[in-house]
Image: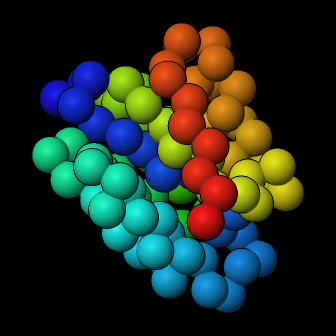
Amino acid sequence: MKYKSIYISGKITGDPNFEAKFRKAEQYLIEQGWNYWYIVNPAKECNQKWPWWLCMLKDLWMLRKCGFIAMLPDWPQSRGARIEHEYAIWKKKVIIYINF
């Protein structure tokens, strides 16, 4: 599953429309041919009642199993997405920058 998974990264905290944005990214990836891959959508995985740091731990746990990461356009404005980006570089994951 490691290399057949792609993780979506972008701004969640402070974005009231993050769920719709991540769903749109998931649909975009499917339309671009990623439909045979497991798409990891962290907007679906974390409980919004959890503290930020606990969601980040879970997100990094999910990201470690993926071979690819898709960065949404707003990722530079997100502390968490910047951490995920640095982690992806460190672990030599393939980074895709989505611009829709």
In this picture, residue 23 sits left or right of residue 38: right
Q: Residue at x 31, y 62 (%)?
A: 31
| Left or right: where 53 falls relative to 78 | left
Q: What residue is rendered at 25% in x and 24% in y?
A: 2
Q: Position of residue 68 (x, y in %)?
A: 42, 31
Is residue 2 left or right of 7 when viewed as pictured?
Answer: left
Residue drawn at x 53%, y 13% as measured from the top left? 91
Instruction: Estimate the x, y position of residue 97 in percent, counting from the top left.
Output: 62, 43
Q: Quadrant of residue 78?
A: bottom right
| Image vertical order of residue 97 relative to residue 46, above or below | above
Residue 94 coordinates in the image, percent (x, y): 49, 23
Up/down of 19 relative to 30, above or below: below
Q: Residue furthest front?
A: 32
* Residue drawn at point x = 53 percent, y = 55 percent: 55
Above or below residue 16? Residue 15 is above
Residue 60: tell me if it is visible. Answer: yes
Q: Let me know if residue 38 appears in the view.
A: no
* Quarter of the rendering occupied by the C terminus: bottom right
